[in-house]
Image (cartoon, coloured by chain):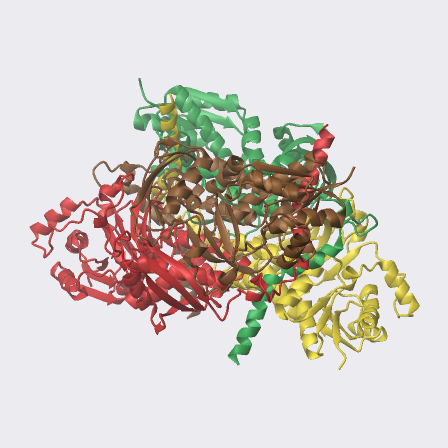
Chain colours: A green, B yellow, C brown, D red
């Protein structure tokens, strides 16, 4: 039986050309796999047909939007995952899910090899290859664009030669990756980091500077899962989609940053993630109300490591699993409601309530009903400061001994 | 010689009454000390006269605004200090400076004791007392409001009995603390955490929802210090003040959060810190460009600890000194310019340039001039993922052994 | 019905006197609770009778040795818990278990209050009171020794007055706390930190300097639990007891250190924990073989925080629960055998084997059979060092621009 | 002018052959550089002559022992650097120093390239190449053993063909690296991790199981620097050498562990580092006495990162510099004496004294003179446990609401 290669297929120029190129170069059959993670754009059935027209022996398309929201975006939300305190890991989250589908397809179709279209200077090659190695260590991986130094020009020539059904004239000035958790834009004039982005760059968000009425939203969480919006039950996917629409309409979630790539260089990235940013903001504030202080402080350390790890392509890794166990435990009481105002590019919590609240009005109030025993404070303050005080006494003694 | 107490004096009801009360109760002379950290409001000379009218034997007022900006706000800026990822430590920064002035006054005026007007359930008592212990371990501290369970009603009665020159009818519905780094508002109807703040609460910021033209600003840093705005040289104090004005006019820097106090309770706080938030945002983005990845990652851990420590009243402490040494080292190359748009409550970096930039166009570009050797990537990715792959092989072996 | 107090009862002078003293002072009935955590010494039944003779209305004794080993020592072993990298938390582990029994007894006997005999300058008062508050927030706590400034002299006078059946002449020169996880010795001539401990101080360990034959032991773990010694199945308690005997006979596990107490002072402590140290050493080495690198690195951070938390009395706390979830996940593959030599005060791993090993002879060997593809290394090294190299280029450029 | 290559020269087979091989293959002149880091063995002058005899145009030998002790071992001591809590970074410390000498030689001799003899599966290639890139980003690096897949057999054949003055019959069964900070042994029968090491493996340490008299030593530190032993002033190098002798004679500092290499595999390593382990143990105990608690706790995090970083080849890196600034600050008060017993493989602190001690007898004692105000403890304990108590109340309420 002829060996097979499973190719991560997007429907675009590079991977369409890749189908035939891999088949010709290596003599194997190519199975194209496209995964819907909410990137929008073309119909999956169109993409499937194009893959076959380009020479794939099989073309598989999968609607993985709910799986993506529940198993990839939700853990990121619960970890308040923001790489470098900013970036909600838009592309980094979708890659492991795509890897999972590729590996399953390779098993099903008897392929020994997986192929992807990433270049050699980005993070995605790492996420693909490390993910594949972690799920199926025996699978081989090929990366034609990287390992054979393909260029857009070569790809167009190849497509035209073979009359592939691809419109090679379409060319965005940017390199774009998008899914339901957000959208990433890079290259083009943005590579000059003094240039500001222009409106043209954005697709998920309206201009926050345009006047419009504010939108107030109430998000309900149960154990860290968004379960209702304005009282209507939602799936995680629906929560993200609705907030993409509503927060996006208010210009929420635009980011423009210089970022540290795993391969050792800094790159300039523009993101928009209205739903992700609105959800994370609400979730953080509900945690402020329901998560105990020491736990909250250490969780920040875990969140940072979680974000670095996922950014760095280590979604499927022993450390990620153990951090997930920690985070899962922290979510047990993250239940309640957060009211937010979405407006002018901002998602601002204005109210929170929870049956699991640790905020205790009677302890917090300075008004009648104050239940806090202030007489305890003196002893606390004295012992809290004792190490500093002893250190200060040492300084005094050393100084006077020095005289 | 009569013993003396140095009292941290604000000019308000509690501490005005405190002067006479301490004198009567303890038979000592009271020296009132008021420190200008940019809180605005009354003239310092007025405050000085009132202290004397209320019975102080001496009244000292100090304009410490530049000292505060340079020695307290600046380290916080360089540490991107945001407690719980939000709060720029407005009150927490001013307390150690006031402590320093109190301790100096105690030495100068021969006082054995320092007094403050804090309650027993807040953070400030800790910051005062731990700070005093760390600078002058032999000074005694008294806290009449806390230790003698004073109330507003008692204070008013005392003031009226003795005809003190205080207007006891003025009463904000909120408890407010402010200085040049920001403004904190608590209590009142905000103690119900489901209530949103109303415009009435704010004083440093205009309503971000009002339409107005955006303001573009270029901030220049040298080694982590803001040295110019739009090309005009500024002191640190001037930088904060100008950005308070300009970012405040755009509604930047409002915060509404539930916060973990050191004394073990959660409280609801509303802050506004337009200058601080604008400066920290710019500084973070310049660090993204100029600070190496591993250093940037570890610096987040340091920043979190720094913020907790300062929040928790440990400004004068051995750990704080050592973290400062770390942070100082990180700022060596944080020089350059950040262009930001201030508008609609947002401070958004849109451009950055630096002679010390680590962003390398030729390594980052996907265009002509690409200097990144993509052939290196394969080996990197393989070894980067090797531990996960070996772990995956173990899973396979254990599974097949289990059969 | 008369109110009741549950007293943590050791059988010694202070708590024996405490029974009657509490009853007289407060008019309540006292229920004495003694818990066997492997401290050895007197028979529990003797202790029970003495409590009754001293005036307790009820006396409860519980053999909690297995519970202690499995639910308190084992998590510490899996966390390789060594406070300040040295101290295996001997006393800190037993206090929460005792607290659990006190709270259960309070519920069963209808007591509103729990009493303990700790002083006000140690860690144990914190562990008792914070633990009680976390299990039964409505219980009151009294601490006669601390809150009523009891002294040994007062206690003896009281006991003699009332002819209590206590031998008041026995007095160790040291303050000692011991259980199956180890033994702590403090005070006496050890309070001069320049004095070395003498043999007299030790009870769990023989003099390591005495010549004797070495003992070789093989410890088998399954998912982080010691399940066999030299091939014989053991319970956790039996594992600790056998290693206390065998490692103790070789002088393993003595510690002499200056330690940071939670109440802000440094104290000098001498410990012996032969079983604990032998087990932790073996467990760490098995983790070296079976735990993936990134996980192992982060686990150290978790271990340190876990140890601080438990030392600081926060066994029953939300953060502890979440750290436990992390640690539990890390133990999934910690199965296999470690061979150790116990001799001359040292427990030294000399061999390890595991079906879940991540050590791969074929990747590690420099001999025939080497499966490591060295050609991958170049790319890895280049990209690993790229950030430092770019930073070095910046230095060059800034230097030459400076000229 | 003919281009030149600077070769890191050890005097052994591989690098001796390398001289001629590089010259022949690449047509350049080879400059051999050998650095004395206390590895003992052959006379440097012998090595220098052999390099010339093997074809080097220049041969440079440098006695860098003091530089190594002061600038590489000392920072490791102050960071208590133990990779994986065990390994004192013996080889990892010497590589950056050698790199520094190679880079200086390259500059002096006008070489464009540096060569080293490392394989492709170890850590040292990383330390060499990343170090060179960080000091001289424009230098090229070649690694013949790795990049041209050299073997011992090829090297012997080459040496015999050309009659090089090398004794090719000498062959240790182990791969050994040693310097004044310690000695690393790997490969051979140790690659079976169930095999225990035999006495034959060790050279720096006597058998700890042999009966002998104990050795008591007093080490004096000033600001974290060992400055005297038993009252005699020593340089850092002398301190390490003397303790290598004395602690080595007692069998101190043997380690046998499975270790995580940077290239992603686990390897088995046997180390001996008598001086390093004795010094680190003494230094840690002096820190226990002189470093404030919060600082000590955070320093552990810094120490772990420092150790990983240096192990991972990032000695010359921005993060390392900033961590060094932190560590330097922590050493200000690490002055005083530690008395240790060296015996039977153990280095045990038995006494410590310091003018900068934070141990306060009057606060610590339970005897007369107790200055600790126990009445402060109650308030401290209550507020310390308040967050756990509030969390416990929540549990109660949720449970009763659930009924």
- Left or right, residue D110 beside residue B229: left
Quadrant in which the N terminus of chain C is drawn: top right
Which residue does the image show at 41% across and 39% down from the upper left? C242
Which residue does the image show at 50% across and 54% down from the upper left? C185
Instruction: From the viewer's side, name the closer residue of B307 and C158.
Output: C158
- Image spot of residue C209 (x, y percent): 33, 54
- Left or right, residue D211 beside residue A213: left
Residue sticking out furthest to the front: C163
Which residue does the image show at 60% across and 49% down from the upper left? C166
- Image spot of residue D286 (x, y percent): 45, 63
Instruction: From the viewer's side, name the closer residue of A26 and D318.
Output: D318
Quadrant in which the C terminus of chain C is drawn: bottom left
- Image spot of residue B218 (x, y percent): 60, 59
Callout count? 0
- Image spot of residue C163 (x, y percent): 66, 50
Q: Picture quarter containing residue B167?
A: bottom right
Say whether residue B158 is visible.
Answer: yes
Name above or below for residue B303 compared with residue C236: below
Q: Picture quarter containing residue D236?
A: bottom left
Instruction: From the viewer's side, name the closer residue of D129 and C81.
Output: C81
- Left or right, residue C132 beside residue C299: right
Q: Picture quarter containing residue C287?
A: top left
Name above or below for residue A213 compared with residue B53: above
Say whether residue B250 is visible.
Answer: no
Name above or below for residue B141 compared with residue C315: below
């Amino acid at each position: 039986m002829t060996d097979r290669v499973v190719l991560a297929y997007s429907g675009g120029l590079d991977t369409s050309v890749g189908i035939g190129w891999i088949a010709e170069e290596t003599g194997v059959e190519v199975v194209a796999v496209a995964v819907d993670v909410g990137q929008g754009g073309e119909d999956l059935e169109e993409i499937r047909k194009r893959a076959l027209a380009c020479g794939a022996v099989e073309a598989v398309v999968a609607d993985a939007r709910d799986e993506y929201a529940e198993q990839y975006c939700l853990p990121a939300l619960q970890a308040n995952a923001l790489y470098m305190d900013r970036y909600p890991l838009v592309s980094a989250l979708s890659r492991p899910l795509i890897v999972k589908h590729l590996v399953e397809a390779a098993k099903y179709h008897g392929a020994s090899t997986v192929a992807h279209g990433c270049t050699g200077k980005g993070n995605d090659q790492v996420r693909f290859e490390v993910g594949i190695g972690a799920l199926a260590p025996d699978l081989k991986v090929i990366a034609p664009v990287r390992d054979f130094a393909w260029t857009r020009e070569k790809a167009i020539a190849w497509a035209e030669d073979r009359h592939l059904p691809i419109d090679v004239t379409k060319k965005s000035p940017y390199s774009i990756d998008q899914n339901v958790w957000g959208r990433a834009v890079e290259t083009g004039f943005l590579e000059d980091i003094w240039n500001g982005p222009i409106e043209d760059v954005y697709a998920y968000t309206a201009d926050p500077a345009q006047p419009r009425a504010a939108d107030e939203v109430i998000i309900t969480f149960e154990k860290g899962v968004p379960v209702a919006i304005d009282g209507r039950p939602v799936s995680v996917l629906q929560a993200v989609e609705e907030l993409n629409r509503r927060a996006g309409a208010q210009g929420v979630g635009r980011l423009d940053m210089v970022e540290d790539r795993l391969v050792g260089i800094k790159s300039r990235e523009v993101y928009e993630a209205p739903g992700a940013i609105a959800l994370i903001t609400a979730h953080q504030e509900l945690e402020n109300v329901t998560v105990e202080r020491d736990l909250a402080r250490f969780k920040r350390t875990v969140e940072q490591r979680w974000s670095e790890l996922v950014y760095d392509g280590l979604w499927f890794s022993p450390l990620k699993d153990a951090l997930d166990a920690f985070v899962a435990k922290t979510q047990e009481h993250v239940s309640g409601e957060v009211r937010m105002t979405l407006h002018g590019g901002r998602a601002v919590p204005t109210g929170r309530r929870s049956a699991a609240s640790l905020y205790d009005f009677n302890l917090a109030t300075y008004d009648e009903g104050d239940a806090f025993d202030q007489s305890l404070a003196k002893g606390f303050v004295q012992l809290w400061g004792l190490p500093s005080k002893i250190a200060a006494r040492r300084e005094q003694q050393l100084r006077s001994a020095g005289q």
